[in-house]
Image (cartoon, rainbow, N blue to C red):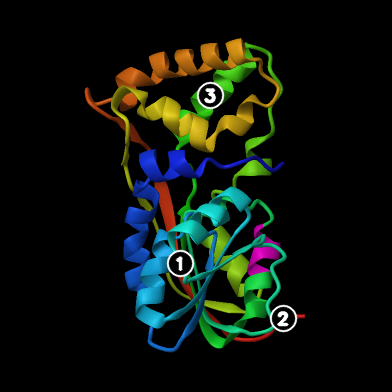
């Protein structure tokens, strides 16, 4: 299922996504004259940082809205509307980078195979995304409320991919990569917007759960979720989401069929 992203809400209320990603750019360590592919570039802020270091970066995103915003912000960079599962380039890249995106691709094997096809042998694959039980308190509470209202919604597994280290490392190793570094860690994350932070987060990242809900049902479910979670993840000024991240550095060892 595809849904539309809101670039303004992303930039104005969820810029922590790319700010945390600056650490991954350091891990990527772009070198001058390298060619790098940024998968799920969003509105282009991290792509810009990579471009300042290597000069030759291409950003792709499955959201045309995000790509349009990225092109307006950084017209000197190549941004292309493309899907991580089936993008096609004639050239192969020195490195592939991705931040906070791959958990949106349940068909992880297809995405990894496509990455292999587009990397040079020895090329590095540096990614970070949601790991096992990421945002569990928020997602599970919303599920409970949807079930209480007897509303059908897409399965979490059909929309989100939150693997363990062993699960994702095995997937990479079965598809021509050697994993050099892997970590799964908690990263409690302050949601911007004060008291409105949780509702903004749900509207930005989890609105697909309400595809079969009326506006009034959606409003009631979010209101109940906020009431339930406030004693648990609201610190008096901000909501603290229970983010968990998986961070991987792998190298392409061989081609796959």
Q: Which residue is mark 1?
A: 248
Q: Quadrant of residue 109?
A: bottom right
Q: Which residue is mark 2?
A: 256
Q: Quadrant of residue 39?
A: bottom right
| Secondary structure under the numbered disc 2 in the rendered image | loop
Neighbourhood count class around disc 2 (C-alpha, 10 Å): few under 14, some 14–19, many 20 upward:
few
User: Which span is picked out in magenta?
Assistant: 108-113
Q: Earlier in the sequence, mark 2 or mark 3?
A: 3
Residue 150, position as x, y percentages in the image: 68, 13
Residue 55, position as x, y percentages in the image: 42, 81
Q: Which residue is mark 3?
A: 142
Is 192 contained in the magenta span? no
Q: Is residue 30 visible?
A: no
Is 111 contained in the magenta span? yes
Q: Nearer the viewer, residue 76 or 2?
A: 76
Residue 211, position as x, y percentages in the image: 68, 27
């Amino acid at each position: 299922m595809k849904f539309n992203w809101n670039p303004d809400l992303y930039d104005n209320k969820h810029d922590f996504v790319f700010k945390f990603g600056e650490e991954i750019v350091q891990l990527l360590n772009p070198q001058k004259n390298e060619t790098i592919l940024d998968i799920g570039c969003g509105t282009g802020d991290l792509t810009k940082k990579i471009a300042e270091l290597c000069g030759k970066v291409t950003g792709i995103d499955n959201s045309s809205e995000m790509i349009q915003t990225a092109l307006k912000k950084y017209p000197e960079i190549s941004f292309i509307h493309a899907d991580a599962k089936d993008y096609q380039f004639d050239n192969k890249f020195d490195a592939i980078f991705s931040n906070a995106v791959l958990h949106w691709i349940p068909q992880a094997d297809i995405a990894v195979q496509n990455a292999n096809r587009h990397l040079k042998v020895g090329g590095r694959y540096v990614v970070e995304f949601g790991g096992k039980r990421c945002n569990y308190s928020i997602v599970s509470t919303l599920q409970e409320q949807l079930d209480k209202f007897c509303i059908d919604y897409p399965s979490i597994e059909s929309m989100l991919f939150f693997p363990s280290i062993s699960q994702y490392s095995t997937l990479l190793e079965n598809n021509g990569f050697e994993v050099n570094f892997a970590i799964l860690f908690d990263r409690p994350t302050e949601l911007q917007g004060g008291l409105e932070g949780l509702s903004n987060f749900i509207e930005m990242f989890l609105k697909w759960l309400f595809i079969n809900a009326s506006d009034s049902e959606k409003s009631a479910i979010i209101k109940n979720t906020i009431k339930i979670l406030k004693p648990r993840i609201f610190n008096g000024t901000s909501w603290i989401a229970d983010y968990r991240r998986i961070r991987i550095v792998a190298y392409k060892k061989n081609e796959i069929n």
